[in-house]
Amino acid sequence: MLSIMVCLKIKRMLVKSFSVLSSKIIFLFSILSVVCPMKAQSTLNLSVRKGVSIVIPVCISGLSDASVVQKIVEDDLKFSGFFRILPIVGEGSASGSEEYVDTTSLQSWAHIPGSVFVQAQVKEEDGQNICRLSFFNTLTKRCLGKRVVRHKGDNIRLFAHRVANAIYKQFTGESGYFHSVIAYTYEKYNSRDPRKSKQCIALVSIDGKECNFLTSPNKTDALLPHCARTRPIVTYLIDRGYGQHKQIGVMNFVEKTEFRLPYLRNFNSTRISADGNEVVFSCSGEDGASLFGYNLNSGKMYSLTPGNNAYIDVSPSYSPDGKKMVFVSDRVGGIPRLFISSVHSGSAPVCISQGGGKYFAPAWSPCGKWIAFVKKISGRHYLCVCDCNGGQERAIAQSLVIDRPSWGPNGRCLAYAAKSGDSSPYVLYIVHAFGNPSGGVTVRKVPTIINGEAHSANHPSWYPLSLEGHKE
């Protein structure tokens, strides 16, 4: 009996000792994990989340006499990821009667859950192209609504994009963006004589079918465009060459009028507010780079970070309401990270970067909830997205080099430029930031061809309207 009690006592002592030892080991491990953190992840895993999972099967009838319009409309809707195109079963021809409905196609898709039918009627009245759209539930045959699209001019592609916009808005509740354009830096390098290399601002439709110069390629170089969201205003850097300081140009790209900001040391980067009233930019000094703002209405310039800044503050981007900005600074550990500050409060900037690597080129989304940026890790660039507090960070695209991103009007897509090699040209891409609901491709190349020649396309900035769109 005594031996049993002794054994039990020894057992309890061993258990207690083991428990104490385990606690010390765990405590020591926790200290080591802080003092000697694990090696930073050398690469990022791409994570493209799915946003809206609903995909709408849609049949569009009545545009067969204008097959170009039909093709553009269907391509636009497929690109959005929210629609699956059903073929026309009936004749699908346009009719002079507004009451005409292609009942064969309407009835043929009633067995597909959630499918809808769009009856289009196209006419030309008083010099306008007019498309009247009627929307039906294929199962109940009930009319879901009607819309009218009017278009002046001969640009049949723009007319088709507006038809697609109307269908998109009817079923998603969001404004269509298929008529929007992307401003970018056109680059043509002359290897024999670099002085003859050209940089200017160009515009391309998001399907890459229309591409034109905005500034002349034969005058002073222009680069780094950034568009306002509610006015046809674009700001950019003007390189006058021969070692002279750069200037900031502001252009109304419909009226083609240009205004230049006063000189202020060395301009690095520039952005414009959503309403087109204020320009924010970075200027380098002797020790670092500071941020400034310029009000286009009053002509007043003001500091956003100290003028004699010891830090390098660059790449500012306004929030949609213009009250805050996100920018890149090396003020923590000398590593480029993202900071947010109130524009006019004078409060200290707050670092929101939570991961490893170097952060560049932030862009605030139109909804105000997300920030896109470029991250560099182990020699590769990643296009990333996080919330406005720095959380939920993830990479959605990668390449050897990625230039700054720009949000699309609906806040679901991003335009960016990338190149696969040091000597390769920059190419424009559009990526679904939260996934393609239809399960299709998430990244699409945007061709940039002017006068039959492809060129390097860099520094994209997405303008929500077409050149004619602001007149609507």
Image (cartoon, rainbow, N blue to C red):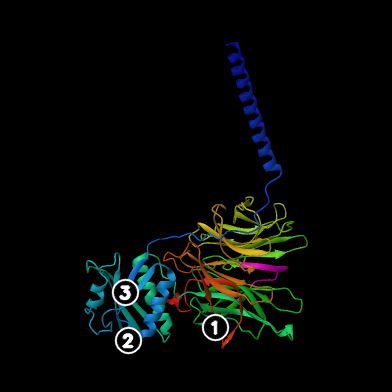
Given this view, does label 2 or label 3 mark the residue nearer the observer? 3
Name the residue: 64% across, 32% down.
22
**Mark 1 Cα within 10 Å, few/some/many (few <14, many 20+)?**
some
Labels 1 and 2: the sequence-earlier one = 2
In the image, which disc is placed on residue 59?
A: 3
User: Is 130 left, or right, of 453 in this rendering?
Assistant: left
Query: Amino acid type of disc 2?
Result: Asp
The one of 74 and 407 positioned closer to us in this rendering: 74
Q: Which residues are magenta?
A: 261-270
The one of 320 and 109 positioned closer to us in this rendering: 109
Query: Amino acid type of disc 3?
Result: Cys
Given this view, does label 1 or label 2 mark the residue nearer the observer? 2
Furthest-top residue in view? 2
Which structural element holds mark 2? helix
Which structural element holds mark 3? strand
In the image, which disc is placed on residue 10?
A: none
The residue labelled by disc 2 is: 65
The residue labelled by disc 1 is: 212
